[in-house]
Structures are given as structure tokens and as C-alpha cells.
Image (cartoon, coloured by chain):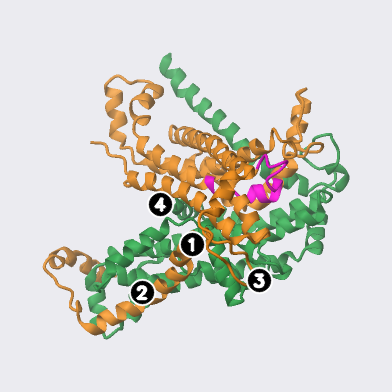
């Protein structure tokens, strides 16, 4: 152990002017290639190849099991843009994102700030709010389904007790998508909370002390002065991550509504799944994937542009 | 006077708000436990009550285990998640070591590729990977569940960043001792990287234990089903008639991870928020 410490201290002295002993020596280079080869081959087979493949497939009429296929140019895209279901699906996905992202980000931030603003029971609260992130979503979706049961569900039972009208939440056109949004917010809040907590911890305590000296006496004014402006970059980062994750919504839709009733909760990945894996229209499914990919790539670029998520307190 | 309000009122408000939120977060779990503990007649009554009049959790669990081969599904989940993680480490660690510590032509290009691949969402490659597995004739096998995830570019990235911090002298000393480059990965680098590997392991196991999309696509056979697929299947079979056993099955499916989480919260939160970086 002490050896390791000694080595650690020795590094800065030697690292600068050292040329690695084995640099360029052929056996070492050969073993380097041997070390990266499995990863490289699998990367080509499972990621880069399929990514190129999905784009290429979207220009074909390939169907799983068909003996041959033809290049059909943009026909899949023409078909897609002319299809009412595609536009419903896209609109529903954007609606889902537009509800879940602000909801889960605001609640995540609020929870993180509340937890951080006092000393008591911090880790208990953190654990409770994080529990939905851990629990298998499919199992919890089925629990939600029973909670939303029109007749015997908890939600309608509580509404009845309050003298309000219940709904067949997952079976009505007007409520199905919003019910899925609620489950989405419930599941994502804890995840965002943890990201915000990590961001808040990095706010140096002396800034609060300074604010207090400057006359910010109440917790609220210190919050306005110090806490709120600082997590800006963190917030932007959490927003893009939440958006990417929301775009991928699938599990709850597949098990609870199957996109229904009458396509009112149809979302992009579900449409892709149905076309590609239920009807085996690989080419058309690939075109849907490309649209999904374009949105996610856009969000990823935004996130990468934000890059360094450290908050700077200069 | 004002300070007094601040010292008592604010903590109280904080706890009230947080407890209210916590209640919402916990409601599905509480309702799941409550329903799983009720006999059929109490579940199908419009009168709401949390505590069952007649405690039927054991009956419901017994029914759940009788109707579905839950042990088998848990075993499947274990086999699949452990195989995926094991193979990911086997593939990623040598590559991460080479990218962090060795010089070879094309290293920077390869690393750029790794970073690029991190951006690919798993749903995007589903159709071509499915076709590939079809060609290989391995659909509806454990291999179909494991093979596509043996490469974790995120794992390579994470471990590479970690290995960068390991001093070169440690490696040089190992070379002096005549240990091969391959040996260095497992005998020198791996032991220093246990915390990072643990965090990555939690991330990987949680992601694949809970995954529904991929098993749904590649599996047909009931005996290969992973826990999420099994619980969805259970629900479809019972079609809204047997909520007690269904909720009991849900408890069984989420229990392993939730219990592990409660025992090692800090590590789990750390491991799962890695997705944030991803």
C-alpha cells in the first residue's frame, strides 16, 4: 500500500519528460490492438453497423422473412409523412415530453432544494424519492393501472370520497396520455432530484455566509440570491437528459394502453415497435427510427454543447 | 420574534412539504402492499381501506408462485444481468486500459468512436440488431438477450477515465516483473478500479434487470422470460381478475433491487446517476 502512495508522489516528477518505454515498440503495439480488438469488433457489429443499417434500411422495402428487397428511395418517408398515425404519434410524443420534462424537472429541483435547505432526515427523504427510479417500471406500471381502475382504484375512490367525478383514466381518449404523463413524472422526479442534489452540494457554503453578511437574513432571500442563479447550467443539463429519456417512453404505453384508445396515447417508439416487430415492416420501422434518432441527436447535441456541467463560481 | 419564526416555522414547513411529496412517491408501493395483502372480496369492494380485514399476503404469494414460475423468472433475470455485466467487464476493461495507457496508431480515432457510440440510443439500433440475431439464428435464446449488450461503450469510457488517473509507474513496475499487458489489466488495473467497476456494475445490473423493450422483442418462449416480461405476461393472462396475486408477483419482481438499494443507497444512487453523464 505504501508503495502505491510512493509511486503516486513520484508521478509528477517523471511524467513530463518521459516517453513511454514501449511506445512504438512493435510487440506492445500488437498487444494494444489485441486488447481493443474485441471491443472494436463488437462496436462495429452491435452499434455502428446497426446505426448505418437502420438508415440504409429506411430506404428499402425490406420485410422480415421476405426473400428479397428493393431500394425504394424516399418512399417510406413519403408514406410516413402522409400517414395520420405518424403525425398523431409525433404529436403525442411531443406532448408527453412537454408535460413530463417541466413537471419532473420542477419537482426534482423543488425537492432537492427543500432537502438541502435543512439538516433533518435528508437521507430518508432522498431514499423515498429515489425509490420509483429503482423499482422495475413495468411492475409499477401495473400497480398504477390498478390504482387508476375505474371502479376499485384508489384514485377514483379518493375522488368519490371528495364528491368528485372519477374517470376511466386509461380507457378514455381524453385522459390516457395524461395518465401516462403522471406516471412518467412520478418515476423521473427522484432521478432529477439526485442530479440537482449533486449540483447543489457543489455550491460553496461561504457564498451563503457572504450573502448573510450582505443582509440576506431569511432563508428565502439567501435562496433568491445564491441558490437560484447557480444551478442554471445544471438545470439546462437535467432538462436535456429528461427530454431524451421522455422521448424514449415505451414501457408504460406498451403494457397499459397499447397506444389506444384510438391512437390517443400512440408514441414514436411504440409505433416503431408495432411496425418493426409486430408487422415486421423493417424498412418502414427503420424510417420511424430515423425520425426518433433525429430528435434524440438534436437533444444530445444541445447537451454536449453544454458539455461541462460544472457550475463556475468565479 | 422573526428569528423565532424562522427557527421553528421553516423546518416545519420543509418537513410538511417533503412528507406530502414522499407520500405521493410511496403511494403506489403502499397500495401494492395493501392490495397484495387483501383477499379477493376486499379488493373488489368500492369501499377504500388500507389495512386488510383479513390478511391474505401469504395466500396471494402462494397463488402467484403457483400460477407463474416466478423462481424461474428471477433466475433468468439473474443469469442475464450477471452474464451481461461479466462480459461487459471482460470486453471493456482491456480496451479501456489500452485507450488510457498504451500508444498505438488509431487510438484517438477509436476513442472518438467510443464517445460517438455513447450517443446512440438503444432503441435506434433495435431493428438491424434484431435482423442480425435472426440471421445468426439465436433469437429466443439467452444469447439474444445478452449478446447485444456485451459491448458497453459507456463502460469503456468510464473505465478509461478512471485508468487515466492510475500512475504509470505502477504499470512500469508490473512490466519489470514480466507481467504481460493482458495480465496488467486484470492483476494491476482491475484491483485499483474496484469502486468504478462497482458503480458501473450497479448501473448495468439495474438497467438490464428492469429492461422491458429488448426481451419483449427477442423472446417468445415462456421459460426464458425475464422478470419484467413475466409480470407483464402475468397481467395479460389474468386480465383484471386476480389483482391480489398480481400485486404479490409485482412485489417479488421489484424486491431484489429495492432491498439491495435500501442496504446500499449511496452506492446505488451513485451508480444509477451515472446515466446522467451518459
Circle 1 crowding by C-alpha within 10 Å: few under 14, some 14–19, many from 20: some
Residue A145, quarter of the rendered image: top right
- Closer-to-camera residue (A43/A48): A48
Relative to residue A293, is residue B106 drawn left or right? left
Q: Which of marks 3 and 2 is in front?
A: 3
Q: Which chain carries label 1?
A: A
Measured in 3D between alpha carbons, the distance from the residue under mark 1 to the one under mark 4, in whole angstroms, is 30 Å
Which residue shows up at 72% across the image and 47% down it? Answer: B33
Which is in the foreground here, disc 1 or disc 4? 1
Give the spatial CA distance, label 2 vs label 4: 23 Å
Residue B78: which quarter of the image?
Answer: bottom right
Which labelled disc corresponds to residue B277? 4
User: Does residue B51 appear in the picture of this structure?
Assistant: yes
Q: Nearer the viewer, mark 1 or mark 2?
A: 1
Residue at 77%, 49% in the rendered image: B36
Q: In this view, does A287 lie to the left or right of A212?
A: right
**What residue sits right under mark 1 in the picture?**
A56
Q: Give the Cα separation between the discs numbered 3 and 4.
A: 32 Å
Q: In which chain is the residue bearing label 4? A: B
Chain B: give its colour: green
Which residue was labeled with disc 3? B140
The span picked out in magenta is A247-265
Q: Which chain is orange?
A: A
The chain under label 2 reads A
Alpha-carbon span between mark 3 and mark 1: 26 Å
Task: Please state which of residues B262 and A257 is positioned toward the viewer in this rendering.
Answer: A257
Amino acid at each position: 500500500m505504501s508503495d502505491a502512495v510512493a509511486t503516486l508522489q513520484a508521478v509528477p516528477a517523471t511524467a513530463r519528460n518521459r516517453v513511454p518505454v514501449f511506445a512504438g515498440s512493435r510487440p506492445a503495439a500488437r498487444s494494444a490492438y489485441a486488447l481493443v480488438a474485441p471491443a472494436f469488433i463488437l462496436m462495429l457489429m452491435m452499434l455502428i453497423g446497426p446505426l448505418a443499417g437502420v438508415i440504409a434500411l429506411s430506404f428499402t422495402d425490406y420485410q422480415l422473412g421476405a426473400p428479397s428487397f428493393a431500394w425504394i428511395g424516399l418512399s417510406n418517408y413519403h408514406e410516413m409523412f402522409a400517414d395520420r398515425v405518424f403525425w398523431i404519434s409525433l404529436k403525442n410524443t411531443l406532448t408527453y415530453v412537454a408535460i413530463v420534462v417541466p413537471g419532473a424537472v420542477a419537482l426534482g429541483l423543488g425537492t432537492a432544494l427543500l432537502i438541502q435547505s435543512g439538516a433533518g432526515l435528508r437521507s430518508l427523504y432522498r431514499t423515498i424519492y429515489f425509490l420509483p427510479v429503482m423499482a422495475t417500471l413495468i411492475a409499477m406500471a401495473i400497480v398504477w393501472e390498478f390504482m387508476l381502475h375505474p371502479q376499485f382504484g384508489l384514485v377514483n375512490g379518493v375522488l368519490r370520497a371528495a364528491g368528485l367525478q372519477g374517470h376511466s383514466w386509461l380507457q378514455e381518449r381524453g385522459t390516457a396520455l395524461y395518465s401516462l404523463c403522471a406516471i412518467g413524472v412520478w418515476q423521473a422526479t427522484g432521478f432529477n432530484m439526485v442530479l440537482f442534489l449533486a449540483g447543489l452540494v457543489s455550491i460553496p457554503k461561504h457564498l451563503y455566509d457572504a450573502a448573510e453578511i450582505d443582509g440576506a437574513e431569511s432563508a428565502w432571500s439567501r435562496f433568491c440570491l445564491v441558490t437560484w442563479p447557480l444551478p442554471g447550467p445544471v438545470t439546462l443539463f437535467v432538462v436535456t437528459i429528461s427530454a431524451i429519456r421522455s422521448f424514449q417512453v415505451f414501457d408504460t404505453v406498451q403494457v397499459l394502453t397499447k397506444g389506444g384508445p384510438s391512437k390517443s396515447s400512440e408514441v414514436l417508439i411504440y409505433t416503431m415497435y408495432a411496425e418493426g416487430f409486430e408487422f415486421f415492416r423493417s424498412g418502414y420501422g427503420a424510417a420511424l427510427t430515423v425520425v426518433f434518432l433525429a430528435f434524440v441527436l438534436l437533444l444530445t447535441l444541445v447537451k454536449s454543447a453544454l458539455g461541462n456541467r460544472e457550475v463556475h463560481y468565479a | 420574534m422573526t428569528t423565532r419564526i424562522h427557527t421553528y416555522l421553516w423546518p416545519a414547513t420543509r418537513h410538511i412539504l417533503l412528507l406530502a411529496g414522499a407520500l405521493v412517491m410511496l403511494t403506489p408501493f403502499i397500495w401494492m402492499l395493501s392490495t397484495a395483502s387483501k383477499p379477493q372480496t376486499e379488493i373488489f369492494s368500492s369501499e377504500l381501506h388500507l389495512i386488510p380485514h383479513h390478511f391474505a399476503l401469504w395466500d396471494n404469494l402462494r397463488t402467484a408462485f403457483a400460477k407463474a414460475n416466478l423462481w424461474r423468472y428471477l433466475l433468468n433475470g439473474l443469469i442475464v444481468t450477471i452474464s451481461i455485466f461479466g462480459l461487459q467487464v471482460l470486453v471493456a476493461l482491456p480496451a479501456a486500459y489500452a485507450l488510457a495507457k498504451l500508444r498505438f496508431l488509431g487510438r484517438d480515432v477509436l476513442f472518438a468512436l467510443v464517445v460517438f457510440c455513447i450517443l446512440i440510443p438503444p432503441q435506434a439500433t433495435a431493428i438491424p440488431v434484431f435482423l442480425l440475431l435472426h440471421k445468426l439464428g439465436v433469437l429466443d435464446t439467452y444469447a439474444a438477450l445478452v449478446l447485444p449488450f456485451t459491448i458497453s461503450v459507456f463502460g469503456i469510457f468510464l473505465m478509461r477515465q478512471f485508468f487515466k488517473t492510475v500512475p504509470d509507474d505502477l504499470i512500469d513496475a508490473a512490466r519489470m516483473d514480466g507481467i504481460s499487458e493482458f495480465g496488467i489489466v486484470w492483476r494491476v488495473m482491475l484491483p485499483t478500479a474496484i469502486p468504478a467497476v462497482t458503480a458501473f456494475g450497479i448501473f448495468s445490473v439495474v438497467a438490464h434487470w428492469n429492461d422491458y423493450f429488448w426481451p419483449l422483442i427477442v423472446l417468445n418462449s415462456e421459460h426464458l422470460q425475464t422478470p419484467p416480461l413475466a409480470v407483464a405476461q402475468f397481467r395479460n393472462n389474468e386480465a383484471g381478475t386476480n389483482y391480489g396475486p398480481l400485486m404479490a408477483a409485482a412485489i417479488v419482481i421489484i424486491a431484489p433491487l429495492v432491498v439491495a438499494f435500501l442496504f446500499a443507497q449511496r452506492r446505488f444512487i451513485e451508480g444509477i446517476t451515472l446515466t446522467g453523464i451518459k
